[in-house]
Image (spheres, rainbow, N blue to C red):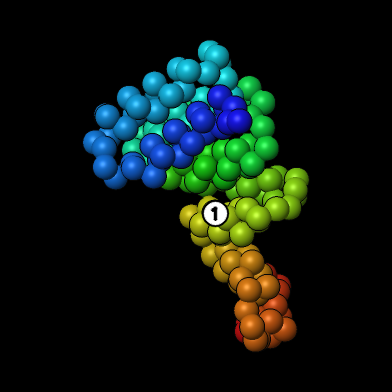
Amino acid sequence: MTTPEARWERRLESLWASLDDHGPDDFLRRIEALAAELPPGDAVALYELASAHDALDREEEAAALYRRALAAGLPGGRRRRAVIQLASTLRNLGRAEESITLLTAERDMCSDELDGAVAAFLSLALADAGREREAAALALTALVPHLPEYRRSLTHYARALTADRHV
């Protein structure tokens, strides 16, 4: 038997899969309708609203909603995704240092399948903050485990980028 929560998640997933089939206002209205099925102030509802605003390039609204979702105790993988998405949104708003702070803390907090995403968005924020060598080193370090060859040399080169040595 399928739970109401599972049915709601399936409807949400279906709506996100059809994002490009809707105009921005229609998509947002549909997300708002789904979110309204959850209790007022629900962390998941706030997160989904934030994500919708973010997808529609409404960064200021998205940032505020991500913060509310996190403050409301967003659970599990959505919590980490909200941090990543908030940090990306802040970077897009010209607040790279705040993005770096969030993602550095997130990187140190836990490890899971989103580690690469944390590193990628942190690399972008570092580059925006004028810390390009650190950004490149972080991106290379995140890439190394996925390479069939050259792991040792690329690890060395990544370290050298931040050690102020020429590679």
Quadrant containing the C terminus in the rendered view: bottom right
Residue 110 image offset from top left, x and y in percent: 75, 48
* Location of residue 166 (image quadrant): bottom right
Q: What is the count of numbered marks? A: 1
Residue furthest out toward the top: 40
Question: From the viewer's perspective, is residue 128 above or below residue 98?
Answer: below
Question: From the viewer's perspective, is residue 89 above or below residue 45?
Answer: below
Say what secondary structure mark 1 lies in: helix
**Horizontally, is 128 left or right of 74 in the view?**
left
Residue depicted at x 45% and y 28%: 49
Residue depicted at x 70% and y 78%: 155
Residue depicted at x 66% and y 70%: 141
Residue 52 image offset from top left, x and y in percent: 40, 34
Residue 32 visible in rendering: yes
* Location of residue 120 (image quadrant): bottom right
Packing grade of label 1 (10 A; few <14, some 14-19, many >=20) is many
Quadrant containing the N terminus in the rendered view: top right
Residue 54 visible in rendering: no
**Horizontally, is 54 left or right of 152 in the view?**
left
Residue furthest out toward the front: 1
* Location of residue 76 (image quadrant): top right
Give whichever of 95, 1 is nearer the camera. 1
Residue 62 image offset from top left, x and y in percent: 45, 32
Question: From the viewer's perspective, is residue 114 above or below residue 43?
Answer: below
Badge 1 is on which residue? Answer: 121
Residue depicted at x 43% and y 45%: 92
> What amino acid is labelled 1 in the image?
Phe
Give whichever of 43, 150 is nearer the camera. 43
